[in-house]
Amino acid sequence: MESKYDRISFSLPISLRDEFESLRTQLNLSRSDAIRKAIQEYIIQESKKRRGFSNKQILGTITYIEKSHVHAHPPNQKHSHENEEENINLTESGEHSHDVQHQPYYVPREMLEFIKANEIQHSFLDIILSAMHIHAGAEKCMEIIAVKGKYERILDLYTELQTLTTIKTINLEIMEVF
């Protein structure tokens, strides 16, 4: 019996495409075969997380890497702005405000999603034991969340975090079922 195929198209960040191309070349796979295998692996991994633990208590972690949010400047660190004519008021912490009146204030997407991730976590305090935020470089942070509780509730937290576009990778690791 012949398998039917469907041609699809999608966009990738250039760096991810380059990593993918390098790996598939090392594995001597065609682009289509490598994508099929990656999708199959993703389906297998996600399916494992969604079955067999119904109504069980689990202990585990949710770990993710996110594109870094905006940080304040350290005290007295030199930095520049697009419009150098603005007055900059430095506080002791190095944070500053600009005396710009009557202009809308736009928050970068990374900051909005960082706030959203924080709000999501606050709606799951009943299952979160602890969370650690790690600065892993200028452009990425890692979050490790220790969780304990009903599997379905933990899966809800994992699923909500997974929707954030600034989260590059996310993993739910089940350490114990009881």
Image (spheres, rainbow, N blue to C red):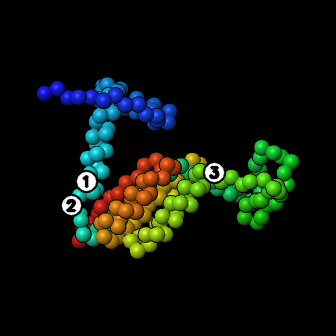
Q: Nearer the viewer, residue 108 or 34?
A: 108
Above or below residue 154? Residue 13 is above
- Which quarter shows the N terminus? top left
Amino acid type for the residue under numbered disc 1: Lys
Q: Which mark is residue 52?
A: 2
132 relative to 81 in the view: left or right: left
| Residue 53 location (% of width, % of height) | 23, 63
- The x, y position of residue 120, in whole percent, is 48, 64
Q: Are marks 2 and 3 in contact (CB under 8 Å)?
A: no
Q: Which of pointers 3 and 1 lies earlier in the amino acid sequence?
A: 1
* Helix, strand or loop for disc 1: helix
Residues at circles 2 and 1 in contact by the CB criterion of under 8 Å:
yes
Q: Is residue 7 visible?
A: yes
Q: Identify which amino acid the numbered label 3 is placed on.
A: Pro
Could you tell me the amino acid type at mark 2?
Answer: Gly
Q: Which residue is mark 1?
A: 48
Q: If you read the primary sequence from the N terminus, does the residue marked by circle 2 or circle 3 appear first? A: 2
Q: Give the side of residue 136 with respect to residue 148, left or right.
A: right
Q: Between marks 2 and 1, how big is the CA–CA gap?
A: 8 Å
Disc 3: which residue: 108
Quick one: label 2, few (<14), some, or many (20+) residues within 10 Å?
A: few
**Residue 142's mark?**
none
